[in-house]
Amino acid sequence: MRFFGNGLARAAVRFKPAAFVGTFIALVLAAAIVSACGILLESGLRATVPPGRYAHTPVVVTAHQRVGGREESEPAPDRVRLDASLVATAARTPGAAAAVPDLTFPVRRGAAALTGHGWGSAPFTGAALALGTAPREGEVVLDEAAARAAHARPGGRITLTTADGAHRFRVSGIARTSPRGRTGGDGGPTVWFTDARARALSGHPATVDAVLVRPRPGTTPGALADRLERALKNAPAARVRTGQGRGAAEEPGLEGAREVLEGIGGSFGGVATMVALFTTAGTVALSVGQRGREIALLRAIGATPRQIRRSIATEALLVAPLAGALGTLPGIGLAHWWFGQLRDKGAIPAGVELSVSWIPLVSAVGAGLLTALLAGLAAARRPARIKPGQALGEAAAEPFRPGVVRTLLGTAALAGGCVLTGVAASTSGEDAANAALGVVMLFMLAVGLLGPFVARGCAWLVGLPLRAGRAPAVLAAANARANARRLASAITPLVLAMAFASTLVFLHTSEDHATAGQRREGIVADHVVSAPGGLPADATARAGRVRGVAAAVGVLRTGVLVRKGSGDGAWLETASAQGVSGTGRALAAVQDLDVRTGDLDALGRGTVAMDAGLASSMGVKVGDRLRLRLPDGATAAPEVVATYGRGLGLAQVTLVRAALASHVTSGFDSHVLVRDAKGADPAAVAAALGPLGEVTGPGGYAAARDEEGELNAWANTVMAAVLGGFAAVAAANTLVMTVLDRRRELSTLRLIGSTRRQVLGMVRWEALLVVTAGVALGTAIALATLVPMARGLTGEGPYLPPLTYAGFVGAAVALGLLATGLPARAALRHGR
């Protein structure tokens, strides 16, 4: 009987495939999710961008786009730049033929967007004159696309707008660029200035985006790169790049793209993988448990426990690899769709490609195989070890005997979830949100491990009103209480679906609701002036000179990095920031920040106002120094002069505009906020502001801010759909398996006189009991997570849109009724 177990497993899969359909489906879905997240993670780790403008430059020196120490490293909100003095250092390096600075900054011609550079970098980036001459002071060179759009020729005049205002230039020439040498590889219109004028117009004359270096004849790019690294050893942020690495130097958004892909594939992928494998393990255990009668019979005819275990292991080896291999196909498709959506939304640069290799695919198949093997062996452990007679008895009537180890682990997870809920509720800010992340996982683990106890309790509680009903309802309540294990297998995936979908979706709705409220109350300006590419700095002064305007404040929106924690445990975190022009009194006229401590009148150079929640989480108060990194990674320590309550809706950090303007790529103001003088005609003021840009009411500012949250909202929705959808399908799969396993029971009920309608009614009541328990537990877990998380992030309780929540409940009810009603009808039809 050496091969008894293997032959039995092959026969079971071959002649009773229906018994393995549920397991097969669960393994396919798990492999799809695991492989998709693995592909995104690998794409983030391998992400590169092919060189575009820098394809013609053998060696490029640029700054590392992550700031902070190794432990607290974070992508900078804007481009990190190099000190301009490094150009001369690179030029003096042995083997260097020439070194020039490269600058890239936005320029506008009317409503059209252009990209500005210094002419010195043109020969290094594949640009050459087609007509005219190189620019001198007061002159520019346009590329062919920009010249066609402006109908310009050498000798003509053109008006261009940069961050500091409008300027009139003479067109000295037209340049032709190679396809690979176009800015960012997108072929956008380009304008070149003299190097000196480009430095002034960029807004950061002391820094450069990159240093472009050409080697002397006989010196290879690799050899020159080695020498440059030694020459620039006193500039730790400098990175010398050759070959494909030049693409990363050209595209600073690559670090952000890596962060997004690694976050989805790693952080979310880890949670999704755990949920997928946890749910799959439950399905495999249910499948093995449903064959308890077969295992008992095998024990009765002399099969040894080792043979039973070998049979279960062989079944896993036969089913799991095929299911995993099939699951990787939709996983690859999901990864391609996910990646494409992120690219369309601007989170990933155009040059980054999706990496699909064997590593995540084999990992997904292996994870499914290991899960199926361990879950099957664990489920078969008791029926394989007990005496044959006892096994037959337990197969006839389901025992309520949760394992001691399982019960202890479940109790520990439940206690841990309760303790962590208390910790999250007692803290504030991001600390509360971070603590709440573990709450949902611990409670979900507790539900899975204590499933029989949870199911029996739910059956008793929810079954109370059923026992007062008609025969189908009474029978459903009795069945649910007697078969707690079967009920637990159906409840657990429903709880998973409800808890994760609610947490992810309602976290966003809570933040969005609080943000919208703070914006609505915080913008007290009468008019909001904006333009597609932003407004030059002089737009604020021009708005202030309009008749009937009492106050005009320009707002430059960006982000900064704040340092949280202390010592080795410190980390950097991005905070929204605004640079405002004018005095604190003028700012108060257009923005009601809800000042809690300090005074905005003290806001000036070297000072900062910040959100009270952020200040609390950092342990900072008025009079302290706030250590932060400006958008380009430069360090600063302004004094805190005020804290306020509407940072979520407006900005978490407020500085004067001059403190930020030289540290951003685009120095254009996002908006100009205008307050009318008392007695002024709003319509007349709006008309007079019209030449500056689009003039709207306060709602125009809110609409523009809402666009920034679209990516986060979309990401949360997709994550909820992936996790919730998988758990919902797993729940339907489990319900179908449990109903089909009860064919004998349903046929017996018909034989003893129950009508078809009564049997179907019992099944419907059982489905509603399962759905009610799953929705209630899932909602409770979601609220335990959302309450501290929402309060930490927004200062308010969670906001659950009634229609959205009703949609979740309705979907769960429909799922339960369909997943039980259809197989029950099929079973009764087959049993006649």
Image (spheres, rainbow, N blue to C red):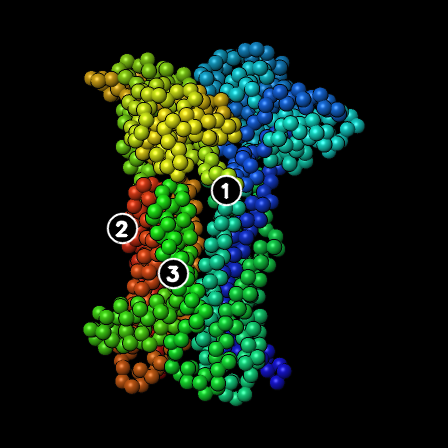
Residue at the (53%, 68%) spot, across then down: 374
Q: Given this view, does label 2 or label 3 mark the residue nearer the observer?
A: 3
Looking at the image, residue 107 sits to the left or right of residue 532; the answer is right
Which residue corresponds to mark 2? Answer: 802
Res. 429 image quadrant: top left
In the image, residue 358 sits, relative to residue 819, either above or below, namely: above
Amino acid at circle 1: Gly
Q: CA distance from mark 1 to mark 3?
A: 28 Å
> Which element carries disc 3, helix, strand or loop?
helix
Q: CA distance from mark 2 to mark 1?
A: 41 Å
Residue at the (35%, 21%) spot, across then down: 602
Amino acid at circle 3: Leu
Which residue corresponds to mark 1? Answer: 569
> Which element carries disc 1, helix, strand or loop?
helix
Q: Are marks 2 and 1 in contact (CB under 8 Å)?
A: no
Residue 824: image x %, image y %? 35, 74
Label whose residue precedes the other's in the sequence (2 or 1): 1
Q: Residues within 10 Å of mark 1 (few under 14, many from 20)?
A: few
Q: Is residue 340 visible?
A: no
Position of the N terminus, as image quadrant, is bottom right
Q: Nearer the viewer, residue 397 or 823?
A: 397
Looking at the image, residue 691 sits to the left or right of residue 46; the answer is left
Residue at the (28%, 54%) spot, across then down: 806
Residue 371: image x %, image y %? 52, 65
Residue at the (75%, 32%) spot, across then down: 223
Residue 255: image x %, image y %? 55, 38
In the image, residue 14 sits, relative to residue 735, either above or below, namely: below
Which residue corresponds to mark 3? Answer: 414
Res. 352 image quadrant: top right
In the image, residue 814 sits, relative to residue 640, either above or below, namely: below
